[in-house]
């Protein structure tokens, strides 16, 4: 049995910029630490799932422009 997190949070830049540097750093740090504990579901099998990923990017979907490259956490 696994505890599986699935997050996809698109936060407006203006709102995100109001979050303190410390809080952002703590979130990134904790995500990175949890990622290190994560495993792939069905690793090595045809139905393997990539359940060890955490990324963010600057997203311009709403503006119809290309997004910036994803950054691994
Ligand atoms: Zn995007």
Image (cartoon, rainbow, N blue to C red):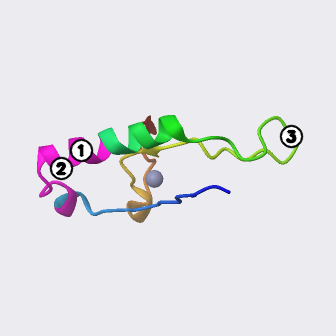
Query: Is the residue marked by circle 3 packed among few (<14), some (14-19), or many (20+) residues within 10 Å?
Result: few
Span of residues in magenta: 15-28
Q: In this view, does 38 lie to the left or right of 46?
A: left
Q: Is residue 23 above or below residue 63?
A: above
Q: Name the residue under label 3.
A: 45
Question: Which of the marked residues, 3 or 2, is nearer the chain's N terminus?
Answer: 2
Question: Which of the marked residues, 3 or 1, is nearer the chain's N terminus?
Answer: 1
Query: Where residue 65 sits: x, y (%)?
Result: 43, 53
Q: Is residue 73 above or below residue 64?
A: above
Q: Which mark is residue 23?
A: 2
Q: In this view, does 52 lie above or below 20?
A: above
Please name whichever residue, 65 or 67, is drawn nearer the observer in this view of the structure. 67
Q: Main secondary structure of the magenta part?
A: helix
Query: Where residue 34 sits: x, y (%)?
Result: 45, 43
Please name whichever residue, 10 or 52, is drawn nearer the observer in this view of the structure. 52
Q: Name the residue under label 1.
A: 26
Marks 3 and 1, Cα distance to the nearest angstrom?
A: 34 Å
Residue at image position (48%, 44%) is 54
Q: Please, what secondary structure does the residue beneath circle 1 have?
A: helix
- The number of numbered badges drawn on the structure is 3
Q: Is residue 16 left or right of residue 43?
A: left
């Amino acid at each position: 049995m696994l505890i599986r997190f699935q997050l996809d949070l698109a936060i407006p830049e203006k709102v995100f910029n109001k979050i303190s540097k410390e809080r952002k750093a703590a979130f990134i740090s904790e995500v990175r630490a949890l990622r290190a504990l994560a495993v792939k579901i069905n690793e090595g099998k045809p139905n393997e799932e990539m359940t060890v990923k955490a990324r963010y990017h600057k997203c311009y979907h709403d503006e119809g422009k290309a997004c910036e490259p994803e950054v691994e956490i």
